């Protein structure tokens, strides 16, 4: 009962924040005035002058995509420099060494792509300056990159403009109007609840028992807030959001989850406003939320049921291995669902120690990759499946499919298919390769089907730009660092560029008025079509892999093997 | 475009990577100095005993013990869980062995034991126990310290916290705070009693 109340409160809070913030973002990225102009505009104009950007200049989709990729490339270079040189740079009170090249490559690609896969452990491998200039920094910029890519796509859908806007202006405004103020406020709440925020080095304690304990600290809260608001997920510490300093209380656990959901859900309402059809936003929001709740139900029930052998022996309270007392089964199961829905990838419990069916859920959500999805990228993926839904139903009734008054033709479907197919390809191909290489299988911790799940999870997490792990896998090897690193880059930029291509092509089409025979996409019926398309494509691509991984393992735990 | 791309990368580098953490630190230290510095447990004489947020090792029967360690015993430089698959037989055997030990200490071979007392946490540093997990340790501590069980149970009730805002999370008790209170109680008794 207590758990049900927590769930209902959570769903209500998510919706309560998403609707107004969605409206706010529609104004921030719209053509008219936006709230806070008097304060923010002078600041933004100063930045434009400094970097020589004309805020009135508009970009075609090619220019927009190029600016996005080139800027991200330079950001990567800056991050790489910091990681390789952190030993010699200031703000390193605990004397952390420089990061080796393959690990630095993996870390840089991981954070620029909003994945936040971590093959390093923050306590011992990252100086304070590294945490700030190579981690906190891309947590902002990668989130902003995702947001502006989604916004550019929406502009193309609205049909009033031929261009996609100005990448640099959008990027700056995503920081000043949205991410920086929110991150600052959330960080202070996290500190109040017990997250450290200091530049002093580790604390050296003499425990009650007379032993010494070295307690690493640092600017934790300022990283944690943007980590979740930007659906990044990379932890300050190795234990990520299970660490009591990152996530000190049930309240912070709630704030972390709400932060992850905030922008992906809000963008759905931004979308509704920008296309002038709020009903459409509600239909998709409801459909996705139903999928989310179904997924949550599986992991919650499975963790509550726990391990049959323990139940028989008189151990109460479900599977608590890898979970924290303050969150319990509910707070852990919900966090797992949220972090792999919003593709954040932080964990407040260890996914490797979930029951097999519990571990199935995060993997399945990352494979579907659009149960809300990450900041910006999630909305793009949702719209990708909407396009596929419109296309498939169009084929069934034999009409040219239309989306929001624009015809979906060969070019759009081709580009959408590229974005759709690259995802299973970059998950299944490297997983199969890794399983054939003795060096790569040596990294596996747990035997049998669970070991297969560890490798499958790793590439799924990379491709979905999630970043969570079945952390038993020792992924800090040259093979995993480079292959997962490259999977993350492909997972991020291939689909963004393909969808910006769709946007560019749609932007040039003149809207046709919806005829009587046009398929309406803002009805519960289409919501159902959307869900079926998502599940069908997901199952076709991934069911065989899931069957030999978590499903086989769960069956053998139940019935013995 | 390249010049603008470099420019924006540098400007955001300074704003988000330097200014933002610095300003947040200023505010955090001004308003919440205790939490900002890691919620340290400091004795009257200034000795740092640890952090309320971070579990530490307690040897001997006279303390409340935190949850079983995951990697290196309660070393904050090695945070993380065991990552063991719970379907593994060797893992299940380890847990059942812990269960036996708990029941032996409690002198009750049929005691229902909450899962958190016999499993490792996600961080390996979980500072909390469920109320039942603390109660299961009371008989052992009572034998070791001579404090009556009813007094130890009262101590647990005093330190325990309910669900937050009556809704969120689980009821729990902080092991470090519990042991701090236990130590204070034993010290107070020591001073009243004649030297042995």
Image (cartoon, grey):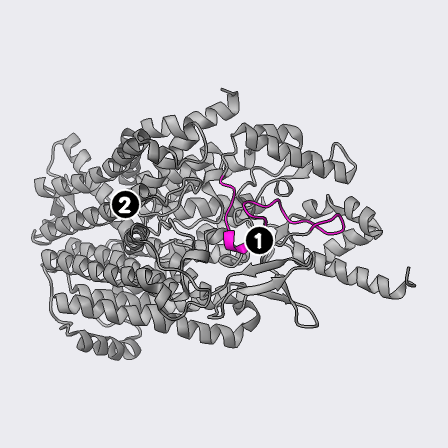
Residue B177 visible in the shown view: yes
Q: Is B129 contained in the magenta span? A: no
Residue at the (41%, 48%) spot, across then down: A338
Do pointers 1 and 2 mark residues of a single chain? Answer: no
Badge 2 is on which residue? A482
> At which x and y percent is residue B57?
64, 52
> At which x and y percent is residue A293?
42, 42
Instruction: Kindly indicate whether the residue at mark 2 contacts the one at mark 1 (C-beta within 8 angstroms).
Output: no
Q: Secondary structure at mark 2?
A: helix
> At which x and y percent is residue A400?
10, 38
Residue at the (14%, 32%) spot, across then down: A395
Q: Residues within 10 Å of mark 1 (few under 14, many from 20)?
A: some
Front residue of B161/A462: it is A462
Tell me the quadrant of the picture where the N terminus of chain A can be found. Answer: top right
The label number, if any, that marks residue B167 in the structure image: 1
Q: Chain of mark 2?
A: A
Task: Look at the picture and state if A525 lies above or below B29.
Answer: above
> Predominant secondary structure in magenta?
loop
Q: In the drawing, does residue B63 fall left or right of residue A321?
A: right
Q: In the drawing, does residue A107 fall left or right of residue B74?
A: left
Indicate which label's residue lies in the foreground, 1 or 2. 2
Front residue of A371/A168: it is A168
Q: Quadrant of residue A273?
A: bottom left
Q: Residues within 10 Å of mark 2 (few under 14, many from 20)?
A: some
Q: Quadrant of residue B192?
A: bottom right
> The magenta stretch spans which residues?
B59-83
Front residue of A286/A125: it is A125
């Amino acid at each position: 009962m207590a758990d049900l109340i927590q769930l209902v409160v959570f769903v209500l809070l998510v919706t309560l924040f998403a609707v107004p913030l969605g409206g706010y973002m529609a104004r921030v990225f719209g053509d008219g005035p936006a709230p806070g102009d008097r304060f923010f505009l002078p600041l933004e104009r100063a930045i434009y002058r400094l970097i020589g950007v004309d805020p009135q200049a508009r970009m075609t989709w090619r220019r927009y995509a190029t600016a996005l990729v080139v800027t991200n490339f330079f950001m990567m270079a800056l991050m790489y420099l910091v990681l390789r040189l952190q030993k010699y740079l200031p703000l390193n009170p605990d004397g952390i060494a420089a990061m080796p090249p393959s690990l630095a490559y993996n870390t840089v690609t991981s954070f620029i792509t909003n994945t936040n896969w971590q093959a390093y452990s923050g306590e011992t491998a990252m100086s304070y300056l590294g945490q700030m200039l190579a981690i906190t920094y891309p947590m902002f910029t990668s989130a902003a990159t995702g947001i502006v890519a989604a916004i550019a796509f929406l502009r193309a859908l609205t049909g009033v403009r031929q261009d996609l806007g100005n990448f640099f202006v959008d990027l700056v405004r995503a920081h000043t109007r949205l991410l920086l103020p929110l991150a600052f406020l959330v960080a202070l709440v996290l500190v109040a609840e017990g997250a450290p925020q200091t530049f002093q080095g580790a604390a050296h304690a003499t425990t009650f028992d007379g032993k010494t304990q070295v307690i690493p600290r640092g600017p934790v809260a300022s990283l944690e807030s943007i980590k979740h608001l930007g659906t990044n997920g990379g932890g300050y510490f190795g234990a990520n959001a299970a660490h009591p300093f990152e996530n000190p209380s049930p309240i912070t656990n709630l704030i972390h989850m709400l932060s992850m959901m905030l922008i992906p859900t809000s963008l759905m309402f931004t979308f509704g406003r920008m296309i002038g059809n709020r009903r459409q936003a509600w239909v998709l929001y409801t459909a996705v939320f139903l999928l989310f709740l179904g997924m949550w139900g599986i992991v919650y029930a499975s963790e509550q049921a726990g391990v049959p052998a323990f139940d028989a022996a008189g151990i109460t309270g479900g599977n608590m291995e890898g979970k924290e007392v303050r969150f319990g089964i509910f707070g852990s199961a919900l966090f797992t669902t949220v972090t792999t829905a919003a593709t954040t990838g932080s964990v407040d419990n260890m996914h490797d120690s979930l029951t097999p069916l519990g571990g199935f859920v995060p993997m399945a959500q990352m494979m579907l990759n659009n149960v809300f999805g990450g900041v910006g990228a999630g909305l793009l993926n949702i719209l990708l499946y909407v396009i596929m839904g419109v296309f498939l139903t169009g084929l069934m009734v034999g009409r040219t499919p239309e989306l929001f008054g624009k015809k979906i033709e060969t070019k759009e479907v081709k580009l959408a298919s590229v974005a759709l197919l690259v995802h299973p390809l970059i998950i299944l191909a490297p997983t199969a390769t890794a399983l054939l290489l003795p060096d790569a299988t040596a990294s596996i911790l747990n035997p049998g089907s669970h070991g297969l799940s560890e490798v499958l999870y790793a590439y799924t997490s990379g491709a979905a730009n999630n970043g969570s792990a079945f952390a038993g896998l020792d992924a800090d090897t040259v093979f995993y660092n480079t292959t997962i690193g490259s999977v993350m880059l492909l997972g991020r930029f291939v689909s963004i560029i393909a969808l910006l291509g769709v946007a560019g092509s749609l932007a040039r089409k003149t809207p046709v008025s919806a005829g009587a025979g046009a398929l309406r996409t803002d009805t519960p019926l289409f919501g159902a079509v959307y869900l079926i398309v998502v599940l069908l494509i997901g199952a076709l691509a991934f069911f065989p892999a899931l069957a030999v991984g978590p499903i086989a393992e769960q069956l053998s735990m139940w019935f013995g093997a | 475009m390249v010049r603008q791309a470099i420019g924006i990368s540098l400007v955001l580098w300074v704003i988000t990577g330097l200014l933002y953490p610095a300003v947040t630190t200023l505010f955090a230290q001004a308003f919440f100095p205790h939490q900002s510095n890691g919620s340290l447990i400091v004795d009257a004489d200034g000795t740092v005993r640890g952090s309320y947020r971070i579990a530490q090792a307690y040897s001997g029967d006279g303390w409340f013990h935190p949850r079983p360690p995951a990697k290196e015993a309660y070393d904050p430089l090695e945070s993380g869980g065991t990552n063991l698959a719970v379907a593994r037989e060797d893992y299940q055997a380890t847990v059942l062995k812990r269960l036996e030990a708990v029941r032996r200490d409690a002198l009750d071979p049929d005691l229902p034991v909450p899962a958190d007392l016999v499993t490792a946490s996600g961080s390996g540093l979980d500072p909390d126990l469920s109320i039942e997990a603390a109660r299961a340790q009371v008989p052992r501590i009572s034998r070791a310290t001579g404090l009556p069980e009813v007094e130890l149970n009262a101590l647990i009730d005093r330190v325990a916290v309910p669900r937050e805002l009556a809704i969120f999370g689980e009821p729990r008790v902080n092991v470090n705070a519990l042991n701090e209170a236990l130590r204070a109680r034993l010290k107070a008794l020591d001073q009243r009693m004649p030297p042995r």
